[in-house]
Amino acid sequence: MGFGLLSISIWLPIAFGAVLLATGRDDNPNASRWVALVGAVLSFVVTIPLITGFDNGSAALQFSENLLWIERFNVRYHLGVDGISVWFVLLTAFINIIVVIAAWEVITERVAQYMGAFLILSGLMVGVFCAADGLLFYVFFEATLIPMYIIIGIWGGPRRVYAAFKFFLYTLAGSLLMLLALIFLYYKSGGSFDIATWHKLPLPMPAQALLFFAFFAAFSVKVPMWPVHTWLPDAHVEAPTGGSVVLAAIMLKLGAYGFLRFSMPIAPDASREYAWFIIALSLIAVVYIGLVALVQQDMKKLVAYSSIAHMGFVTLGFFIFNELGVSGGLVQMISHGFVSGAMFLSIGVLYDRVHSREISSYGGVVNTMPKFAAFALFFTMANCGLPGTGGFVGEWMVILGTVSFNFWLAAIAATALIFGAAYSLWMYKRVYFGEVTNHHVRELSDLNAREFGIMAVLAIATLWMGVYPKPFTDVMHVSVTELLKHVALTKLQ
Amino acid sequence: MNAMNWLVVYPEALLLLMACAVALVDLFVTDEKRRPTFWLAQLSLAAVAAMHLAYYDGGATVYGMQRMMVSDPMGHLLAFFATVAVMITIAYAQPYIASRDMLKGEFFSLSMFVLLGICVMCSANNFLVVYLGLELMSLSLYALVAMRRDHGVSTEAAMKYFVLGALASGFLLYGLSMMYGATRSLEINEVFNAIGTGRINGTVLTFGVVFVVAGLAFKLGVVPFHMWVPDVYQGAPTAVTLLIGGAPKLAAFAITVRLLVEGMLGLAVDWQQMMIVLAIASLVIGNLAAIAQTNLKRMLAYSTISQMGFMLLGMTAGVVSGNTLSAGNAYSSAMFYVVTYVITTLGTFGLIMFLARTGFESEEITDLAGLGKRAPWLAGIMTVFMFSLAGVPPMVGFYAKLAILQALITTNLTGYIVLAVVAVMLSLVGAFYYLRIVKVMYFDEPLAGNATHPVQSTGVSALLAVNGAAVLVFGLMPGGLMAMCRDAILRALAT
């Protein structure tokens, strides 16, 4: 099995990015923009056959490619997608197009480098979702840090350097422990980095516990879970709009995906043993971070905290070990990709015009930007989980799953819907409603065609997920059931 | 058995001959840039490299010069890399020293003598030959450090290097003489056999090993024998810093393997303990001190200390619970680490030289400010090097660290696993100062003083691009180089 669709999905955007970095010149930014757009669209188009040709009835890895990569350590270039990962490949490629279009007129400095960094980042993240070999996964997982570090550092806000370092070092700290865990598994499995082999590997409890916490270190930082979430508000606030969108829509999902791919199947007994720990942290994220979001003055920070709270739902859903919970978490991940991306884009729209992210700088935007305010209302509603939007389906599934696990946990989790509504709607009220407060707002111009286009596309996606989530859950169903069956079995001997 | 077998030393003989020829030819060169000398030196080195590669491919282990020298794949592979490293060094250095009126023919011939010393060490099979090679290399380097005669810092660095270097050579010689006294042999294989009999006085052997390790530690530049490294790196002309920081690390690794592994594997329990202490101390001090530096060369010196510490960790995992099953894995990981480190270092210092110009050294970290805007290609290449040194995939430095960590963890002993955790946490500290370089290049605005770099040499910039590409390509495809190192080490252990 040689190069196939997945390789193309990974390397096509990277190739376009490399070309942009190598040839892009500052005196001709339009050429860079068009090359980036063509690259992003092509990269998305090649991922479409993955979903149309996907066999929903199988939990096995599909479209797999398997080549020997590093003989010395028996590392394989092994790619494949199953029901859990396939949607994320599409989501990543899709969000990349949005990011490229969103930056069209906004980014005027070093355009080629900006576009190149995002294209490369997109390819690397697709690689993370496709990797079926532990080391290959790690290489993609870590490599994503480099473009993101540079994106935050070059095109970010005033405290961008601090945010970039914090982002890089926090994530690296966690990943290095995961690297040791991967090497330990390599040793225990008799010299294999194959994830499927690791899934079957019997492990005693102390080893499982160590592995579980090593993986936890890497993935909890990435998700991020309370209390290692503090890098995220900084990174979000300082990153350029595109950076925030990619961070929220895709990068956070890498961590949650890691829990499903590594922690739960490789250390199932430890996962069950320490599920209370994850559940507790998730609930803290849902409730406490929800409250923190309520008091934010900065719009981006508010959405960043709301992301943490939403990701709390995802981890909660995973660690109650039933199908509703896990599928709900996955649906929540995808819909959060659309919704949080749209939220950050909305803030970007305002920021490009007024150059302020403070809630208090606005007021009465609806009077000057009616079309935009309508979109923003829709996404705000989706963010607090209004039925009919994508945000509702995932949260509802997770809460239902939690009820069958423990009613009181579900009750606590459900309060998130209240807090979510509170901070989202309160922000909406302060920014959009009321009298026009200052001349900046008075001079605002409504969405241009480009902005309208991306908002509309994201709105359709969110609505589609809310009204008809079946295509998503159908694809996941078999893989999730298989995973849960596997996790229910003990690996102790 | 005791034949001269001249074939073994053909590369060294050619090198010696050409080093003398280069010195002579240079007398008749009038060109200011010394182009004929430069090309003659490069051609000779290319021929030497080709010979080493051919010998490595041959794969046989042959003894020569009455068993003074050994020709085995490990020695030839290391010598090959060292030769290539010196070729690259000279290529980077030539425009740099030419623009500083330091370019004399001696630079080329002394560099070749440095390489000769390195090659001798790589294929030494006798304590005295090891020492001979070491002194040949060191004395040539002392002279090169002092090349900038009228420069205070340079002269101080040369003095410091010479005095401390002589002390370290003394340590090594003293240790070797103790080994000789205990085992009645100077030949490495016989020492190994003698120790294996178990009838040698343990106290003398332990004393000997302590001194040998101290001498080697000095040459590798690990804590607490690291004092010379920052001063020499900073004080020496950058061209010479590169010569010191590149190929000699390969030689230091070679004699570490020859002396400690091939000669004293029986004492591994003793020297491994010392190495663990040296490695951890180097990682701590190297990484922490590097954070505080404002001078780029000094920072890279501390970074070297920590990198060598990391490499030594690989050397500690060879003999576990009394058996040598993991030796091949551990030592080949260390070898891969050294080789990739040298490739990266060459590029880093090459780039610093490329940025320098007459009257301006580009040695301070702030001199790189805004490089991402001024010269995106150079900044990109430097970024690749920095991420490689920090051990971030997909750069080759990651696989080097992976190999070492893998060697530690597969021992399956709690102590070694703790060591691996400590090592990764300290390399996290290290990531900070490598990232800072990237930050200065991309996130900071250019300072008023340092506009674009005027020294333009298409040859050097092409070489830099190739060097950067190598770090990336070996990162995407590290398999071949890893296999070569493993193969070389396994054959060396087999004899």
Image (cartoon, coloured by chain):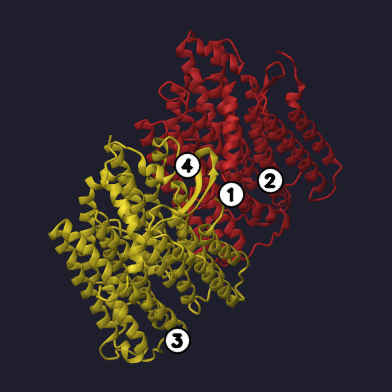
Mark number, residue B436: none
Instruction: Give percent across and percent down for residue B204.
Output: 48, 13
Q: Distance between the residues labelled 4 and 3?
A: 50 Å
Q: Which residue of the protein is positioned furthest toward the right in this rendering?
A: B28
Q: Nearer the viewer, mark 2 or mark 3?
A: 3
Q: How far apart are marks 2 and 1 (CA)?
A: 14 Å
Discs 4 and 1 lie in a common subunit: yes
Which residue position is annotated with label 2? B88
Give the residue type at disc 1. Answer: Val
Q: What element carries label 2?
A: helix
Closer-to-camera residue (B99/A171): A171
Q: Is mark 4 on a helix, strand or loop?
A: helix
Q: Are marks 2 and 3 in contact (CB under 8 Å)?
A: no
Closer-to-camera residue (A146/A162): A146
Q: Is mark 1 on a helix, strand or loop?
A: helix
Q: Which of marks 1 and 3 is in front?
A: 3
Discs 1 and 3 lie in a common subunit: no
Which residue position is annotated with label 3? A448
Q: Colour of chain A?
A: yellow
Return the chain for callout 3: A
Q: Distance between the residues labelled 1 and 3?
A: 45 Å
Mark number, residue B402: 4
